[in-house]
Image: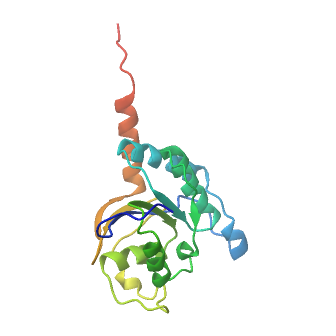
Amino acid sequence: MPRPRKGPPSMNLYMLRHASAGTRRVNPLLDAKRPLDKEGKQHCLDLATVLNGLKLNFDLIVSSPLKRCLQTAQLIATETGYESRILNSNALDPAATVAQFQRLLRECTAAENVLVVGHNPNLSVFLASLVLPVPVTENTEAVSEPTRIPIRLRKGSLARLSVQRGPATLQWLLDPRTVRALYTTSTKSSRRKTSRK
């Protein structure tokens, strides 16, 4: 874990829903081992290129222990030059509650730029709980109030929030289609121009 920072607690929190991982399995044990598919792996590489273009570096990466999230986190980490260990947390598991997620964030306050990789529907609920906070108890279910989810996170979506005292501020949200457009634009503009004679 990074050393604590001086001053008021603030964090740039990046919330990433795992990339495409094919069809959900009925057996939960098999579903936990479901890997990213080809499209999901390519999306992670495209997203990492966009993040590198934005010059974003993470101080801490935390992932759900399920394979599709770990693979998403590992690809992003490798491609963006993250050299520390990726932490696994059950607070990002599909069955995790808002209270567990908020406890995880309190444990991460020493880091300035934190990437968390998780699942829907609870990742959307966690995001909503930061932007539109309501009192949370230990028994608060992750998806107890689905009507409170004003933000849709498609697979591979990345949200950036500024977390300080009080409600967090949603600064931006990169949808997979936006990532693809940014990636395509950045690769076209970085190609060497050749003269035609």
Residue 137 vertical placement versus 169 (above, below): below
**Quarter holding residue 187:** top left
Number of disc labels: 0
- Visible in this render: residue 185? yes
Q: Nearer the viewer, residue 76 or 146?
A: 76
Q: Quadrant of residue 153?
A: bottom left
Judging depth in this view, the residue of 141 and 78 nearest the camera is 78
Asked if residue 166 is positioned above or below residue 82 in the image, the reply reads: below
Residue name at image x 51 percent, y 49 percent: 82
Residue 5, percent from left and from top: 37, 63
Question: Residue at coordinates 47% horizontally, 79% vertically from top-left?
Answer: 103
Q: Nearer the viewer, residue 2 or 182?
A: 2
Residue 7 at what x, y percent from top left?
Answer: 29, 66
Q: Is residue 93 left or right of residue 123?
A: right
Q: Quadrant of residue 136?
A: bottom left
Q: Is residue 138 left or right of residue 148?
A: right
In the rendering, at what x and y percent does residue 64 appear?
57, 68
Which image quadrant: the C terminus? Answer: top left
Q: Is residue 27 visible?
A: no
> Relative to 188, is 90 above or below?
below
Residue at screen point 54% across, 80% down: 96
Is 82 on the left-hand or right-hand side of 170?
right
Return the residue found at the far top.
Answer: 197
Q: Which percent across, then down, holds residue 31?
A: 67, 70
Q: Residue at 30% across / 80% down in the picture?
A: 132
